[in-house]
Image (cartoon, rainbow, N blue to C red):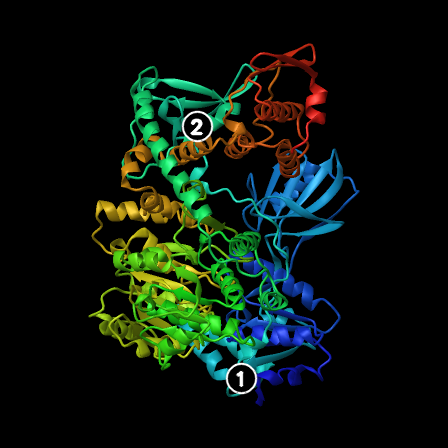
Amino acid sequence: MKKILKEEIEDIFKNIENTCIYISTSLKNMEYYEYILGKKGYNVTFFKTNVGSKKELIDINVRLINLLNKKKKNIIFIDFSLAMSIFFDKYDSFTLEVGKDYNLNKIEEKLQEYAYEKNYLITEMGQYSRRGDLIDVYSATMDNPIRLDFFDVELEKIKIFDIDTQRSYENLKEIQIYSNILRGDKVLITELTGKTTSFFIENLELVEHSLETMLLLDNNDKEKILARYEVLKEKSEIIEVALSENRNYQSEIEIKRKKELKKKMKYSSITELNKGDYVIHVEYGIGKYMGLKMMYDKEYLLIQYADDGELYVPVEKLYRIEKYINISNKEPELYKLGTKGFKKKHKKYKEEIEKVAKELIRIQAKRKKDNGICFMEDTVFQKQFEEKFEYLETEDQKKAIEDVKKDMQSYKIMDRIICGDVGYGKTEVAMRAAFKAIESGYQVALLAPTTILANQHYERFKKRFEGFPINIASYSRLSTRKGVLDDLISGKIDLLIGTHKILGDNVIFNNLGLLIIDEEQKFGVKHKEKIKEKKTNIDVLTLTATPIPRTLNLALLGIRDISVISTPPLQKLPIKTEILNFNDEEKLKKVILEEIKRDGQVFYISNDVKGMEDKVKYLKTLLPSFIGIEYIHGQLSAKEIKGKIDAFEKGEFQVLVASTIIENGIDIANANTIIIEGFNNLGLSQIYQLRGRVGRSKRQAYCYLLKSLKQTQKGLKKQESISEIENISSGGYVIAMEDMNIRGAGEILGNKQHGAIESFGYDLYIKLLNEEIKRQKGEITFNNFEVKMDLKDKGYIPNDYIKEAERIKIYKRIVELTKISEVDDIKDEIEDRFGKIPKVVNTFLDSVKIKIYCQKHKISKVEEKDDFLYFYFTNNVLKLSKKEVLEGEKDE
């Protein structure tokens, strides 16, 4: 046995010339080794499972074979549970090269033979798609899927594309595509390699703990697993790794993202139209969308109304329809065509909307009139501070930072909300704002709803501001520093972080310039009143993970500004949610052991504070004795809560039983499983927040909801809603609609608007309100200007070019465009995603350009005669050739 310190890892490999495989249960250690040795020029690869799916294991198997076939020395770090897997020693593959001729049908046959799943749009590894002359493939060893673009039989381009946007961004000359079925002999990792490969096992005691977990999970194959382990142990040299005292290894790893994020256009699923969805037409009221229909070479949306009434809406008039999103859980009634019911309601509520618009304009004018602080522009120190950020900013994050700086560097009083999902980078935006305010000579206050969250912010800010002469203090139940209030009034403290305690009359700032509020909706009425008092003439930045639909941006016109961060960080995987029976002990035991097997940790949420100690005892009888379990709840002292959270973060125990006290502010990257007991007694938004405690690293995270045997109707409805929140980028929007009843809109617009929102549906209400604000302010809104278009052919998008589910999304985006250049952009995207554009689609896009031209120039009618377009103004007619309009018009 060889003993080393963690930082001495290079000593193991530097005198060995052949490939080395190093096995450990500590992912943190291996992440550290990979970084340190990679920096020194070694060929290093780190294998671990993120999802544990069959496709991921195939990917790892193929990569391992390829690495081990290379003649040069490689150092491979591998998770113990993965090293104990059975591998195949052969695979099938084929290579494609740009410029060569291929039979597309033969390629498709090969992909089917390789067990690829056919999907219209690729969503995960192991799938392929064929659309005309395009074939998309997501093969093992690929970080992203590729698109094969053919011109007849010639492979013209191989393009890497983004799975979220489906847009391509990089070209390749050739690609190797691997089979999803591996072949050859089933072997151990020791047999997959050559005789010269050296094996190492780190910290035998920890490995044998992990082995014990493995045996508990797979009791039937106990002998096989033990035999496998003995072979591995016999082939390996044992390394005992110790840690140096007071050394922060994680801070030595500069985790930089390797790929630049592409700009993504996200379209929230909440507003996507699907067959059977309720919609509202601006003239005819609520109906049901029944799909797209072709009639007389034109495409229409079919809307079904009461008494079998049918309305056919041309696709170019799609802007007159919105998905109906109501703010109660009641199913809406369909209107009858030809009756005056909806028109009467429309008139009544339109008057109310006019009043709301007037009030919003008044507030906006007041905000513009009042002068606030003008903070200094970016300095060298601000740039240095920003360069210390260890990740690449997402596009949305960059935009939010720019918005905040623009507000702060003007005399306008900032009142901005930064809205983004858990882990999307809101705190970094706040840190940069705080730095700017402090450097400009002002103090900053950060207000958090709980002691835990305030403490987490304090620790994070202290670490992030290290190396800069900025004095940060905390003021909450956990504060130990004396004389905080004296230092605050004298100006010695630059940034004060705390709970509602900082709103007290005894807390006096010397020169407060910026107030940052985290999760404002968590504060009670009294505290909100105190916040309003503090807000006078200082800049305010509010952070919220409570998802606000993008459209609420329009409602906030004049009251508060909003920046939405909707782009997830790179490699963030959606959290998998599963509902389990409360009394399924075997399953409960399995999910906890599965997480611990991969060196992870588990949150167990129980709101039974009195029975929490009994819950810990129960879990101790259920789980092996080496698994450490602790508990926290709001009735413990602040010091005890902090101590246990710190110990959990350091990995001193594996399971933390907690009340919903952890809903905000716990950020532990190694905890990737959360079990929520009695979820039917919690609000959906609360479940969403708790679920957000996991999935904060690159690993697959799991949320298990334990349901009681007796289920109410409300509980069953909640279960249905939970199944809709799987997707990481749209889950929040669904929650906002399902659970909070558009609480944001209610609070901002007042309860009087409830009837209007219910009648029009949320989206149409916001749209009408925004239009009314612009009308009262005298602003031109091109896309509201009705144009009668009498063209020979307006074109459409054929079903054999783009399927209906995608086609309706494309139509919706096109009819909302207001610039001719935007039409060209979407044309490029369509060609990239779906192949060569048919003539009929080009005709449709040209008709959209003509419509935009008319709206821009206030032309009420356009008529096509003999290849000329006649434009009708109120008193005049203008005659132009079609070419002059389509090629001569430029966006201003």
Q: Residues within 10 Å of mark 1 (few under 14, many from 20)?
A: few
Q: Which residue lies furthest to the top in this view?
A: 866
Determine if residue 823 is in view.
Answer: yes
**In the displayed structure, does residue 352 sit left or right of residue 83?**
left
Q: Where is residue 476 in the image (x, y as percent from the top left)?
A: 33, 73
Q: Which residue lies furthest to the right in this view?
A: 99
Residue 682, quarter of the rendered image: bottom left
When the figure is inspected, residue 697 is found, relative to residue 253, above or below; the finding is above
Considering the numbered disc 1 on the image, is that residue within a helix, a strand or a loop?
Answer: loop
Is residue 589 in view?
Answer: no
Q: Which amino acid does label 1 sit on?
A: Arg
User: Residue 358, image x and y in percent?
Assistant: 38, 35
Reply above or below: 788 against 138: above
User: Is the residue 695 above or below the residue 770 in the image?
Assistant: below
Where is the C terminus found, in terms of image quarters? Answer: top right
Query: Which of the image's four quarters has the N terminus?
Result: bottom right
* Image-based side of 293 in relation to 77, left or right: left
Task: Name the foreground residue: 360 vs 679.
Answer: 360
* Circle 1 residue: 247
Amino acid type assigned to the residue bearing label 2 in the image: Ile
Give the residue number, with chain letter if any, for mark 2: 321
Give the Cα separation between the discs numbered 2 and 1.
61 Å
Q: Where is residue 548 in the image (x, y as percent from the top left)?
A: 41, 47
Q: Do the residues labelled 2 and 1 touch (CB within 8 Å)?
A: no
Residue positioned 49% across, 30% down in the render: 778
Q: Which of 408 and 366 is in front in this view?
A: 366
In the figure, 478 relative to 889: above or below? Answer: below
Earlier along the polypeptide chain: callout 2 or callout 1? 1
Q: Residue at x 40, y 49 (%)?
A: 725
- Disc 2 is placed on an element classified as strand
Of residues 444 and 692, the one nearer the viewer is 444
Residue 84, percent from left and from top: 53, 71
